[in-house]
Image (tube, helix red, strand yellow):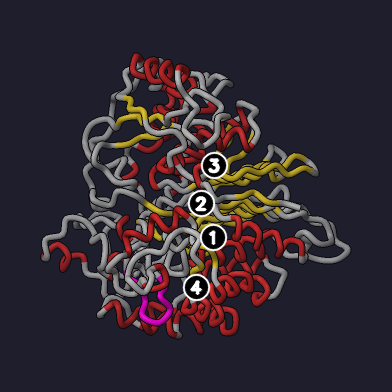
Amino acid sequence: MVASIDQLASGAGVAVLRAGGTAADAAVAASAVLAVTAQHTCGMGGDLWALVHFADGEPPAALNAAGRAGSGADPQRLRDEGHAEMPLWGDPRSIPVPGCVDGWLALHDRFGRRPLAEVLGPAIELAEHGFPLSPQNAAAAEALVGVAGADDYLGADGRVPRAGTLIRRPGVAQALRAVRDGGRRAFYEGEFGEDLLELGRGEYAESDLATPLADWVEPLSAQAWGHRVWTVPPSSQGYLTAAAAWIADGLDVPADVDDPAAVHLLAEAALAAAFDRVDVLHEHADGAALISPERLAPRRAAIGADVWQAGRGEHEAGACPANSRAGDTNYLAVVDGGGTGSGGGTGAGSPVPRMGVSLIQSNASGWGARCFLGRSRISLHNRGLGFSLEAGHPAEYGPGRRPPHTLAPALVQTAAGALRTVLGTMGGDAQPQVVLQLLARLLHGGATPAQAVAAGRWRWDRPQASAFQTWVGTGRPRLLIEGHAGTDGAAGADGAAGGDDTDVLVSELAGRGHDVRREASFDSSFGHAHVIEVDGDVLAGASDPRALNGAALGF
């Protein structure tokens, strides 16, 4: 089964599974399709993280394919130019060398079974022959009018074509063929690398492109609701998922996760885990220490019936520019059939457990840095926004460094170490908060994946802040409530859900001391989450209705 934002991507992944591929094969196939059809959120010019459940009773493998700043990175020059934060658009200094393609190759090399040509085939076909422009993609492409190199998404008149128009991306097809035929060297040291060096104007050296960016790292985990919740380590903010789940597990959270008391306690758990993120998250942070009971127990103990103010929000280190209003990311989940035959078996005659892959890839801001490479027309991310320009800060921009990352895939195992759930979401700073809510609904409240992803959500926010600035600034952030929160979301993505139940929720949260604001129902700022749950021989999956074009497909 494959769950993603795009029916074409989910379908490509299922086709690979039908052909006997593993979940890793299918994840790379689906991810490559998204790099073609959803470049406003992700692509070959972005970064990637993943978790892989490959054996019962074993920790999952964790993959960090986040890029590094070029050898020419100079924070003092930016400060001298008057920058207090990293540049947002049109500046290569916010573009670490993209790690996505290295991530694909690492996943395929370690866990793949089918030939790379077969795995990348659907993406190449769509890039070469075209795919229909989705309404979401068409709306996002309005930001590209007048942007050099954005030809793939603009008509001859320089305007965005209507939704449904066939879009071809021959340059991306050529880049994918280079990966297929020549691996990382053909990509990073071929046309892509040459064009990146030219764009960088000294930001990058050839050695930056020759150095592999994908690292297998130690995952993090915490016990919660009778299961073990896994995530990826720093420089990802994934530790917040594990920390918040551990904190919440020790609170008296009602099983009805729509109960105002449950919302309050879960939101407080997320806040208690995250309020000092900007001070502690960097690539060399000790993830195990950040989620240790010794560190988290006092935070849990301080949570009560009303809001906890102590120690909150007095953190001013730089993050990303406030005019970066939206982030764009793409998450997908895959679970194969295990066994010895088609559906993901890795060797005839030797039974193997199901493999599950939790994969997330991103451009950071919408369309990333809005820089498109000359020949491939690949858009480049601006994940460098996560760097600080504060001199001496542990996340300070510098040569070869990785910025703090919001990308935080998750995976759940049973107490016995079997695969239970693969889940994740886009959403910038809200990612761990959304995953916490999904975990509470699935593991504590007994919801189905479809119920869990459709239900209304909450997230922490600061006025006038971006999707990456929740934990920057002074004072306590406000709590945003989705318009149908307090309900099961059964009315669908038409905004009709909510009403009295949501009004009661907002009122009761305000009574507990929260600064509450009600938002639209099924709003994308609350994430596009996808879930696959394993129950013996049965897989149950769901794609987020907020994604509109998503699909959870199986066979």
- Look at the image and say whether residue 375 sits in the magenta stretch: yes
Q: Is residue 201 visible?
A: yes
Depth check: give the residue in front, 314 or 95: 95
Does 450 sit above or below residue 19? above
Q: Secondary structure at mark 4?
A: loop
What residue did someone put label 3 on? Answer: 545
Instruction: Report how far apart the C-alphas of labels 2 and 4 lie in the structure.
Output: 35 Å
* Residue on which the image places disc 4: 168
Q: Nearer the viewer, mark 3 or mark 1?
A: 3
Determine crowd level at label 4: few under 14, some 14-19, many 20+ residues with C-alpha closer than 10 A: many
**Separation of marks 3 and 4 at Cα, in angstroms:** 27 Å
Which stretch is magenta? 371-378
> At which x and y percent is residue 220?
53, 47
Left or right: residue 85 versus residue 327 is left
Residue 265 vertical placement versus 154 (above, below): above
For the residues labelled 1 and 2, say whether their Cβ atoms are less than 8 Å apart. yes
